[in-house]
Image (cartoon, rainbow, N blue to C red):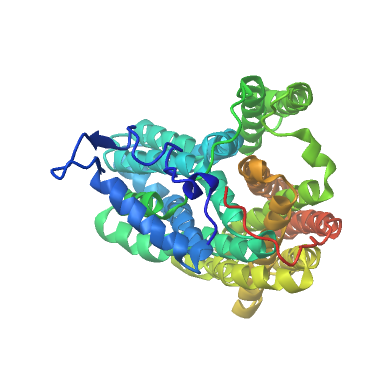
Amino acid sequence: MATTDQEAHGADPEDGAPIGSSGPDRFEIGLEPGGEEGIVLPWSLMLRRGVAGRVERSPRRSWIILAAALSGVFTASFTITVLTVSLADIARNLGSTADVLTWAITGPSLAMAVLGPIGGKLADRFGARQVYLLSLTGVTVFAAAAIVAWNAPSLIAFRFLGAALGAATGPSALSMINRSFSPERRAQAMGYWSMVGSGAPVFGVVIGGPLVDAFGWRWIFILQTPVALLSLIIGFLVLPHTRRGERQPFDIAGSAVLALGVGLLLIALNRGPVLGWSSPLVLTGFIGGPLLLAQFVRIENRTPHPLLPMRYFRRRNFTFPIVNQFLANFTYMGGFILTPLLLHDLLGYSTTKVGLISIARPLTFAIVGPIAGFLVLRFGERLIGMFGSLMLALSMMVLAMIGIGSGMWLIEGALMLSGIGMGACAPAMIASLANAVDPSDLGVASAASQTMSQIGVVAGMQILLTVQLAAAAGSGSGSYAIAYHVGAVAAVGALVAASLVRRTRHAAAEQPVLA
């Protein structure tokens, strides 16, 4: 297996210093008993070198790195669903209300969307492995802090801070994965990425739900903390050292304007259904957010070292995958929030039954993701992305047909179509985007995709829910069908965006980017 230039010349891959020099990770003892110069290494660094050496020599190196990185993604994802279904219990225990406690879920989503691009840039500049481990450390620390949360504000604060520090986990993990796989194999890796990202919430419901019922909500974080710590240890031992990017000024102005613009837009989308779409806060977000994002574009075009190089938006395999993921997530998550309400209000299903039925969607997503990653090799990103978008549109149309007396097969079929659609779209589009940028910008490109996807998630949930409520307040007839039709229109937009993606042509002898 190829090694970095530093390793080839006897340099320590941890910091570039020659082996034998003094440094923060080692210390030198003048002479050994035999009169020969010797070096004593801390046991943790010796263990890491031993494990890293085995990984480097393994023919499955890329897949080992993928598994290690995905363990961190799993850690950050599996609590979402179980927290959602446990909000009422948490609110009662902490003397608060479920409406207030929703910020324990919404706040982290906002933090990850707003701070993701900054985390991606830090990964490109300071090294993906270093930023990943630091970010995952933040997740671990604040997961442990949430165990002892004494009221609603403290729990929300710990969740927000954990997500703020953990916002770089996804972009830095994607950067390492994309560097470890050759471009033509990235879609396969993204298939497993999708599997873990969608499968982790299923695990949270299946394992976490009974745990919460038996022992209380704090066990969500009692379980998450050791899992996060184990992922951190695995990452320290297995993940490869990555070179730092060029030393250049950090784009502070661009970062601040982007964070504020995205934050205002997401807050407006989130608070619109609660405060009203004409409230001053919501209007400020909808007006100020786009204005700040326009200012961000101007800043990026002027600065010599931008947070997100605007030249990438002139590449169709960068721009259209981002558009596809925004619209696909709009449809997928809009349906995700509507369907439980439909099953409960219209069909009278119990909460437990709704939860069990809803598992079909992410479970199908998790199964289809890796399969789609392999199919991209044969059929290309465009065709698989178009197929996934079409399945999303069909799922919305079938969900719109559900009414009193609808059979279980129709409901489960619609949910499975939705899982198939997102499971096909995500690996193809994320791989296309990664292949469209320079290797030095893989982190920030991944973060841009994460941010736009998260905006799509929030927009889909809030807009489709608002459409349904408005329709119910009017005629009251077919309100859910109207909302699902809006989701179907968004999926058709995703289909058009996918059709504009070009199939990536790979050289036969392309090798993974190891630097």
The reply to whether residue 192 is visible in this rendering is yes
Percent x, y for residue 178?
61, 54
Q: Classify 121 as above or below 65.
A: above
Percent x, y for residue 248?
62, 25
Residue shown at the point (29%, 50%) measured from the top left: 46
Out of 323 and 430, give the one closest to the viewer.
430
Out of 398 and 249, give the one closest to the viewer.
249
Residue shown at the point (28%, 53%) measured from the top left: 216
Q: Classify 227 as above or below 383.
A: above
Quadrant of the rendered image containing residue 386: bottom right
Q: Residue furthest left?
A: 33
The reply to whether residue 405 is visible in this rendering is no
Percent x, y for residue 503?
81, 62
Residue shown at the point (41%, 48%) measured from the top left: 87
Q: Is residue 368 left or right of residue 505?
A: left
Percent x, y for residue 271?
61, 34
Out of 221 and 360, give the one closest to the viewer.
221
Task: Give the number of marks.
Answer: 0
Q: Which residue lies furthest to the front in this view?
A: 35
Out of 39 and 472, give the one closest to the viewer.
39
Q: Is residue 508 left or right of residue 365?
A: right
Q: Is residue 347 left or right of residue 380?
A: left
Q: Classify 488 as above or below 391.
A: above
